[in-house]
């Protein structure tokens, strides 16, 4: 998993993108939902805000949780889980 995290660079998938992340993100055609936790120290929402700007059908929905990186994995409150379920349901409509 660590190797994937370190080497999972979508900007390296197409040589013509020359490692440009905004260009690579712009290639994404699927509806995308990015859901960081407000208190995530690994993937802060500010990073995702910049990324979602380049995804044509991207939506940022920040989980307002004290559970940090664990908020999206079921460790959060019932309110966190309800918010996540609502956002995913909207995405799948």
Image (tube, rainbow, N blue to C red):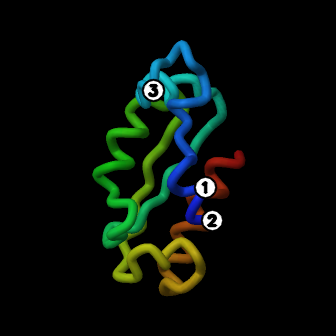
Label 2: how many residues lie within 10 Å, few (<14), some (14-19) or many (20+)? few
Kindly report the distance in space between the C-alpha atoms of the residues bearing marks 1 and 2: 5 Å
Q: Is residue 59 left or right of residue 93?
A: left
Residue position for label 3: 19
Q: Secondary structure at mark 2?
A: loop
Q: Residue at x 59, y 81 (%)?
A: 74
Q: Residue at x 43, y 48 (%)?
A: 60
| Left or right relative to 13: residue 17 | left
* Label 3 or label 1, whichever comes before in sequence order: 1
- The residue pinned by badge 1 equals 4
Q: Is residue 64 left or right of residue 74?
A: left
Residue occupying the point 51% across, 27% down = 24
- Name the spot of residue 67 as percent of width and height, x first: 40, 82
Q: Badges 1 and 2: C-beta atoms under 8 Å apart?
A: yes
Q: Residues within 10 Å of mark 1 (few under 14, many from 20)?
A: few
Quarter of the picture holding the N terminus: bottom right
The front one of 91 and 27 is: 27
Mark identifier at residue 85: none
Instruction: Check disc 2 and report the residue beneath it.
Output: 1
Q: Earlier in the sequence, mark 2 or mark 3?
A: 2
Q: What is the CA distance from the residue labelled 3 to the residue labelled 1?
A: 17 Å
Instruction: Check the image and name the residue furthest to the top.
Output: 16
Residue that appears at 34% across and 56% down: 45
């Amino acid at each position: 998993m660590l190797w994937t995290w370190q080497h999972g660079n979508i900007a390296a998938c197409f040589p013509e993108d020359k490692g440009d992340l905004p260009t690579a993100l712009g290639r994404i055609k699927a509806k995308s939902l990015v859901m960081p936790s407000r208190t995530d120290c690994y993937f802060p929402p500010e990073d995702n805000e910049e990324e979602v700007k380049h995804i044509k059908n991207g939506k940022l929905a920040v989980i307002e949780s004290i559970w940090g990186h664990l908020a999206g994995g079921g460790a959060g409150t019932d309110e966190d889980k309800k918010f996540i379920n609502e956002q995913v349901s909207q995405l799948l409509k």
